[in-house]
Image: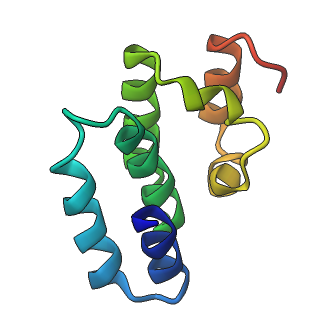
């Protein structure tokens, strides 16, 4: 729920609210590995592409299960034009 709100805030240009959600996820990373992917998706929605890739790398290192859906999840659409996206898919051995 919090991730959906954060992405909607980002898409509606309510940046302060979206940034508050980022803080909320940071506070939960130790207890919830999915928060790592949420951070990647929220940063992508905010157009913070470098931060999104940082969190994707972290998710990869932590072997977060939901990462296998990266190729079909529209939340990652803002990242697809970046060459690092295809490199990331290759690293995961997913089709590009």
Picture layout, residue 31 above or below residue 42: above
Q: Residue at x 36, y 44 (%)?
A: 35
> Which residue is found at the position 53% from the left and 79% from the top?
8
Relative vertical location of residue 11 with respect to residue 92 in this rendering, above or below: below
In the depicted view, which residue is nearer to us: 85 or 42?
A: 42
State the residue in front, 95 or 49. Answer: 95
Among all residues in the image, which is located at the extreme left? Answer: 27
Q: Quadrant of residue 29?
A: top left
Percent coordinates x, y for residue 26 in the rendering: 20, 49
**Left or right of 14, for residue 7:** right
Placement of 55 over or under 75, stated as above or below: above
Figure label count: 0
| Residue 61, quarter of the rendered image | top left
Q: Quadrant of the C terminus?
A: top right
Q: Is residue 43 left or right of residue 71?
A: left
Q: Position of residue 5 (x, y in %)?
A: 46, 75
Give the color scheme: rainbow, by chain, secondary structure or one colour.
Answer: rainbow
Q: Residue at x 72, y 47 (%)?
A: 73
Residue in view at x 64 percent, y 56 percent: 75
Q: Position of residue 70 (x, y in %)?
A: 67, 36
Q: Quadrant of residue 77?
A: bottom right
Name of the residue lying farthest toward the right: 95
């Amino acid at each position: 729920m919090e991730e959906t709100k954060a992405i909607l805030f980002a898409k509606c240009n309510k940046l302060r609210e979206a940034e508050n959600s980022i803080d909320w996820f940071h506070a939960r990373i130790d207890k919830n590995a999915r928060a790592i992917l949420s951070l990647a998706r929220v940063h992508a929605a905010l157009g913070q592409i470098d931060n999104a890739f940082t969190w994707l790398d972290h998710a990869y290192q932590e072997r977060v299960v939901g990462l296998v859906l990266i190729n079909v999840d529209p939340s990652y659409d803002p990242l697809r034009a970046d060459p690092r996206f295809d490199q990331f898919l290759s690293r995961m051995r997913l089709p590009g």
